[in-house]
């Protein structure tokens, strides 16, 4: 029998998790497929356990709940990969609503192209409309536009195959294990703003020549909080994106030349000057966008940690807690 595990990492977001699990329980399951839901709890302090039990009672899909003690999204992703016992692992977030036809889209993609990874589009679901003065480029930085790859099922070209939306993809378990799982130091952990664990994992899949297929039926609506599109949230996000880019280079054993570092420092100061100019002429959105470009460079130049190669397996399963 074909099988998949729907993996939902979570940390103290019970109300959002409830909506996500309610939408997952409405999935249409094709004949001959066995589907389970695995909630990997990063040590939540709210009533997450009650919400998981509520979903289990509501059915029809079986729901398991495990607690992962390692703090960070990728610890949860790796724990779920090790816990799953299915052909496919579907990675969804705890703050999304999933299209009822998602699994049907996975099956269609698998039958047409025999992929090792299936991705789908992510539609933004704003808690509140972004401020009108924000530029389109700034708003796009939180809406995963790269996930929108058209209206037909197709094999993703290799140069784009690493673009895995971390909140919305499926991977064959054996392929994910061969790739080595997710780097635990990438993606969100506490207040840290490193990201890109999904892309870094996608790069390793692509290097293994594992085919990736896009299916428009594998659609989710992803919640975007007001905090994420606030001035403070965007500043932290763009600086974190810069630090992530430098961290990726260090993982590949690369460091920028002295000449590039000088150029990037000069570019950063030019962006700051441009931001000041736009503020003086009353163009608030353009001024903020230029400031974010400067912060992106600041993150790249000054904020990136040196990351060790990813440990695999990340820890023995016995160090985490199985709830049920």
Image (cartoon, grey):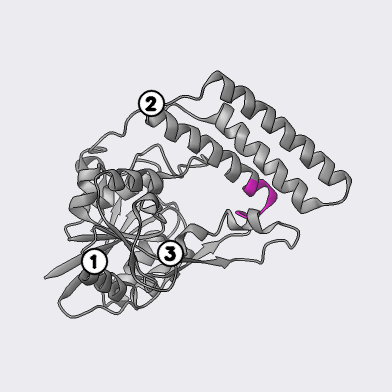
- Where is residue 248? Give x, y as percent: 43, 35
- Where is residue 109? Give x, y as percent: 27, 69
Q: Please determine whether, in this image, residue 188 is positioned above or below residue 4.
A: above
Q: Which of marks 3 and 2 precedes in the sequence?
A: 3
| Nearer to us in this view, 24 or 240 | 240
Location of residue 318 (image quadrant): top left
Circle 2 residue: 253
Q: Disc 1 to disc 3, how far (Cα)?
A: 32 Å
Q: Disc 1 to disc 2, how far (Cα)?
A: 34 Å
- Where is residue 149? Give x, y as percent: 44, 65
Q: Does any portion of residue 172 appear in the rendered image?
A: yes
Q: Which of marks 3 and 1 precedes in the sequence?
A: 3
- Where is residue 129? Give x, y as percent: 66, 66
Task: Return the mark for residue 113.
Answer: 1
**Count of numbered circles on the image:** 3
Part of the protein shown in magenta: 227-234
Secondary element type, mark 1? helix
């Amino acid at each position: 029998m074909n099988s998949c595990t729907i993996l939902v990492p979570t940390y103290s977001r019970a109300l959002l998790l409830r909506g996500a699990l309610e939408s997952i329980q409405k999935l249409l399951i094709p004949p001959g497929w066995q589907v389970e839901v695995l909630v990997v709890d990063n040590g939540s302090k709210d009533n997450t356990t009650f919400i998981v039990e509520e979903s289990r009672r509501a059915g029809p899909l079986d729901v398991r709940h495990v607690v992962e003690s390692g703090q960070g999204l990728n610890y949860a992703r790796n724990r779920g990969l090790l816990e799953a016992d299915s052909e496919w692992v579907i990675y969804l977030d705890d703050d999304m609503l999933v299209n009822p036809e998602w699994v049907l889209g996975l099956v269609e993609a698998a039958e047409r192209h025999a992929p090792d990874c299936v991705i789908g589009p992510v539609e933004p679901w704003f808690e509140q409309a972004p401020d009108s003065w924000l530029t389109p480029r700034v708003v796009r930085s939180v809406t995963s536009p790269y996930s929108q790859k058209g209206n037909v099922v197709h094999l993703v070209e290799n140069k784009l195959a690493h673009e895995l939306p971390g909140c919305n993809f499926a991977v064959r378990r054996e392929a994910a294990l061969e790739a080595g799982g997710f780097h635990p130091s990438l993606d969100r952990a506490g207040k840290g703003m490193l990201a890109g664990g999904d892309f870094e994992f996608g790069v390793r899949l692509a290097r293994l020549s594992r085919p990736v297929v896009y299916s428009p039926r594998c659609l989710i609506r992803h919640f975007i909080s007001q905090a994420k599109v606030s001035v403070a949230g965007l500043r932290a996000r763009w600086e974190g994106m810069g630090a992530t880019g430098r961290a990726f280079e260090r993982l590949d054993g690369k460091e920028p030349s002295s000449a590039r570092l000088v150029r990037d420092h000069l570019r950063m100061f030019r962006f700051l000057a441009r931001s000041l100019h736009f503020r003086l002429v009353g163009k608030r959105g353009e001024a903020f966008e230029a400031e974010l470009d400067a912060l992106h460079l600041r993150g790249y130049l000054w904020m990136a940690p040196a990351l060790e190669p990813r440990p695999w397996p990340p820890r023995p399963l016995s160090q985490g807690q199985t709830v049920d």
